[in-house]
Image (tube, rainbow, N blue to C red):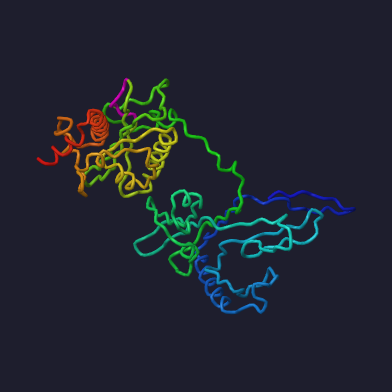
Amino acid sequence: AVVSTQSTGCQDKAILESLPYILQLNCGMSSSDSEFWQHQVLIHKQEDHKSCPQGSNCSNSECKLSHGVEQSSWLPLNFHIKAPNEQGQGSLQFARGLFDDKENSKAGVFEYELCSVIAMIDAPGSQGLMLHSLVDRSYHQRQGIDDCGWYLFNGCSATGTHNKEATSFGQSWKTPCTIVYKQVKLPKELFHHSTPNPHELFTPFNLIPGPNLIPLGANENLTKGELVGIGLSVDPAPSCILRIVLVRGQGVHEGIPFSHDVCPTNYAPEGHQNVKLLYFKIKCLVDRGLILVGHSITKQLKYLNIHIPAQQYIDTAELYRPPHSGAVPPLQFLCPRILEVDNVPGAHNDAVFSLQLYEKFLDLKRAGQFEKTLKAIHSE
């Protein structure tokens, strides 16, 4: 908070000028906090049935009775803080809900909304942290999704949820440890972010050794529209390691991988850093306008829990899907018939063959032979 001092005669008066855009409240610091939250839920349920005589016209900011709108939780989804005026007149006021006093100015009013809750889970056979987060509404507008915007992040899994679940703490096994509010109206400059430099992400320090891997050179640029092959494979048990390889689609080192990432499939805590680095790498490629080419890449991205604009990836499994069929042909089927090579399973080979299948698709399209070839290989 920004506070200025105003001198009035022999007294100095503190004037609140602004509050932080983000309020992060730390709780769940002791074992007794779980009982505290459960107790507040019980109190809230009792108060929810007591109606205020003035209803929605009540002006008492400290009134805890129901005003015709049932609160889903003791924890408010939004609130506002009204600061004293510039002359220091009035007191600091806090109230649930957004400011809706049409007769008075919004000057000095700070409106906040709940945007994320981190809860500690302590149940038999399940311990850890989970995040309930409010995704920016503009994302759902762009995607044409009618949703309340709340998501539950548990490990690397993300599922849609509701604000009632995010603010539900009546269970003994769920205790909030961090609660975050943000101002409803945030300046646009807060959302400005710079695209990561590929030479910082794809350095030998951030690369795991792999066959034929050559890191990006100092003079090697990734430009918009370039193709990058992506391959994904899972090592057999007991290791169950997920391997992701990125391969150049053109240039002197065409077909040579420049990134090799390894992540545990069980999302163990020690592998979270690897997953985060992988996300940054793919984001870097997407932000620079590169196009990812992979076989069944649609399923791979869903498995990795990554969203990429449809115009920035090419799924060769869909390109070679037979007409009026739900089955997609595997690489083991396409490689001998289209590329005249045998496919050796592995993330590197999958990425290379995906690029070659796409190039062959373009050649057949230009020659007007693709539909004929597709019909021939699927009629064998």
Q: Please, which residue is most extreme toward the left here? A: 380
Q: Nearer the viewer, residue 150 or 144?
A: 144
Q: Which quadrant of the view contains residue 309?
A: top left
Taking the image as shown, residue 218 lies to the left or right of residue 213, namely: right
Between 68 and 270, the one nearer to me in the picture: 68
Residue 185, above or below 68: above
As rendered, which of 208 and 136 lies closer to the eye? 136
Is residue 332 visible in this depiction of the protein?
no
Q: Is residue 359 above or below residue 104?
A: above
* Relative vertical location of residue 342 with respect to residue 302 in this rendering, above or below: above
Quadrant of the image occupied by residue 371: top left
Residue 137 drawn at (x, y percent)? 51, 52
Find out whether residue 253 is within the magenta segment.
yes
Q: Is residue 210 left or right of residue 26?
A: left
Q: Nearest the camera: 91 or 85?
A: 85
| Residue at image point 42% right, 54% down | 153
Magenta-colored segment: predominant secondary structure: loop
Q: Is residue 357 left or right of residue 342?
A: right
Q: How many marks?
A: 0
**Which portion, as a residue range, is magenta?**
252-258
Residue 100 location, quadrant: bottom right
User: Does the image show residue 372?
Assistant: yes
At horizontal 70% and vertical 62% (from top left) the residue drawn is 102
Residue 238: x and y in percent read: 23, 47
Question: Who's the residue at 53% across and 68% down the image?
Answer: 73
Q: Is residue 121 magenta?
A: no
User: Quarter holding the C terminus?
Assistant: top left
Q: Residue 236, how many percent across, how many down?
A: 21, 44
* Image location of residue 36, percent across then percent down: 54, 68
In the displayed image of the protein, which residue is found farthest to the right?
A: 9
